[in-house]
Each structure stands twice: as C-alpha cells, then as structure tokens.
Image (cartoon, rainbow, N blue to C red):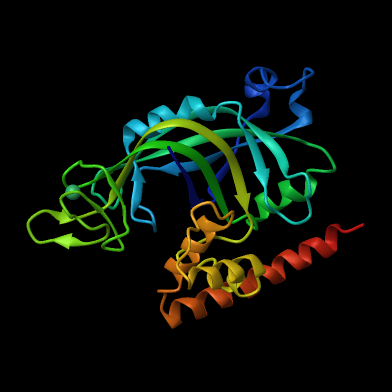
Amino acid sequence: MAKVLKSLSLKTKKADAASDIDLINQFSVRKLTPEEVYCFSVVMCDNDIDREIERFTNKALDALAPLFVGKTVISDHRWRSGGQIGRIYATEVHRTTEKNQAGEPLRQLIGKVYMLNSDDNKPVIEAIEAGIMKEVSIGASIKTRTCSLCGESMGFSWSSWKTECKNHHVLGETYPSEGFCFMNLDDPRDAYELSFVAVPAQRNAGVTKAVNDPDIDDAFDALLSCPDLSEHPKFAELLKHMKQSTMSAADREARKKFLAESEKIIKNYERKYSK
Ligand SMILES: [Zn+2]
C-alpha cells in the first residue's frame, strides 16, 4: 500500500457555524456554541492531474470523502509546536463546471473544518483569512495506481529508471495514437490528516532545503556506493530531491525568489505574534 501526499493551493470559504454546530458537536468533547468556533470549507484535493502527473479518479474522491470525516487538521506553521489546529466535520464531492487537464469535468473533494475560536488559534485564523497559508496537503493510503492509457498497474522501474506500466507507457510521455500518459490513483484505504502549508510545495519546491540537511547529504554520500537505502528514514525525501535535481536553473531561481518572499511574510507574522 502506497502512501501519497497531495497538495493544492488553498481555497477556503467561511462556513456558517450556527447552522453547522450540531455536526461540529459530534466531534467535540463538550458542547460548543457557534461563537466558540471558526469554521470554513476547503478544497482538499481534486481529480486533476498534478505536478507528479497523477490524479485521483472520481471513484477515489467518492471513497476518500467519508474517510476524511473526523480527521484532524494540522498546521506546519512555525508559531505552533503542537500542530493540530482543527477537525474536519463534513466532506462532499463537488462537481464543478470547469474541465480538468484530462478534459473531464473537474471534481473537488471539499472538507468542512472547525477550529476553536481561541487566542491560541487566532494567528492561524488570521493567516488563513489573510491568505498567508498558501497550500493544503492531504495524506492518503492508495492501493491502486494505474496507467491512464491501458489501465495496467504502474510503478517505478529500476531497470528503465522510469515510471511505467507493463506495456511500457511511460509516465508523462505523449503517444501519437494513444495520447498523454498519466497515473490514476484509486482504491484509497485510509485517509490521514489535512495539513496547512505556509510555503507551497510547488513544482519548484524542495530544492534549497536539501543543501543544509545533513541527513540527506549523508544518504546521498551512501547512495554513491549503491547500497540498500530502502529502509533509510529519509529515502522518500532523497528520491524527491533526486527528481528535483533534474529541474532547470530558471525553475530553481523562481523557487528561490518565492521562498525568500514567503519567509519575509512569515517572519513578520511571527514578530507580530511572538510574546
Ligand atoms: Zn499503459
């Protein structure tokens, strides 16, 4: 079973605490009043092809919806150490009028989240409303990964060093007669938390971090001697960084600029809320 982590830029809409309070109270230890909560809906994931050239099928979205009800919402933001900020109290699959990159109607999994309207959560709520939280990620356990062209299961081939199916359709390639090859993610078995990410992990994300991470550097040193790194605690990250090392200089530059700007905004915020 593969765990996947998927990110989307943050789209939230304030929800009506008064009308949702009964739903919310299913998950609270004591009975809450509408004044005590801040709630909103958020697009958690969709059926569009993402930067990893994968997408959730409509069936997967339908299956994920109930799996996320009651799951926690965490924030990677630095001003909080605990991390947990809220809980998903309802979900639904929304059918939009837009089309996704596969040319199908775009569907989104919407989660409704409540947070306590406490002093502790105030900076997070303000950050959400001010648009400083840029992205959400979901974690899910996915059983089936298949080729969009032939439906065969798809995975990384260590012999070709490519992600492909048994018919040798290569992820991200376009075939004249068959079309674009992407991966369908299906049969979710479990859903983990929803996280708010202050710095987007976009197409150009994750590169500058590798430079100062001694674990990654050590792992990379070890990699040069071709050992078994499958159990290495940072193996997934290492693979990610290797993938990103194929990124162009222009992409890296764009990311660096973005991170610097983001850092500035976060620093300002931290200054404002540090005691
Ligand atoms: Zn195929």
- Quadrant position of residue 79: bottom right
- Whether residue 241 can be seen here: yes
- Horizontal and vertical percent position of residue 111: 53, 34
Taking the image as shown, residue 13 lies to the left or right of residue 75, namely left
Q: Residue at x 53, y 59 (%)?
A: 237
- Horizontal and vertical percent position of residue 109: 45, 36
- Is 230 placed above or below 240 here? above
- Quadrant position of residue 247: bottom left
- Is 26 placed above or below 134 here? above
- Whether residue 48 can be seen here: no
212 vs 200, nearest the viewer: 212
Taking the image as shown, residue 233 lies to the left or right of residue 97, namely right
- Horizontal and vertical percent position of residue 90: 55, 26
- Horizontal and vertical percent position of residue 18: 68, 24
Q: Residue at x 9, y 61 (%)?
A: 176
Q: Residue at x 51, y 80 (%)?
A: 253
136 vs 83, nearest the viewer: 83
